Image (cartoon, rainbow, N blue to C red):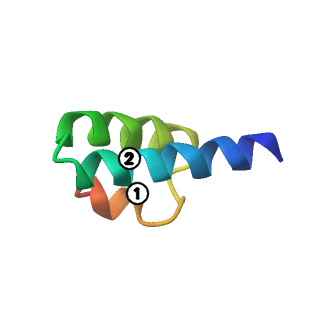
Amino acid sequence: RSEELLRALRYERALVYEDLGQRRRARSELEKLYAEDPDYEDVAARLGL
């Protein structure tokens, strides 16, 4: 359950970074999330996969 929360927080952090124009940080968070769970939300699409 805490893993689910951490994934959700990482995803939200990536979205905030995107909104702030910090694309490298956003991509880094999305890549970490993709490595943990490639089917999470729209992570693959956001990474262009």
- Which residue is located at x 31 percent, y 64 percent? 45
Question: Of 4 and 18, which appears nearest the observer?
Answer: 18
At label 2, the amino acid type is Ala
48 displayed left or right of 6: left
Against 35, residue 46 (above or below) is below
Distance in Å between CA atoms under marks 1 and 2: 10 Å
- Which residue is located at x 73 percent, y 41 percent? 3
Residue position for label 1: 43
Give the total of numbered labels: 2
At label 1, the amino acid type is Val
Question: Of 1 and 36, which appears nearest the observer?
Answer: 1
- Disc 1 vs disc 2: Cβ atoms closer than 8 Å? no
Q: Nearer the viewer, mark 1 or mark 2?
A: 2
Which of the 4 image quarters holds residue 24?
top left
- Which residue is located at x 48 percent, y 53 percent? 12
Against 48, residue 22 (above or below) is above
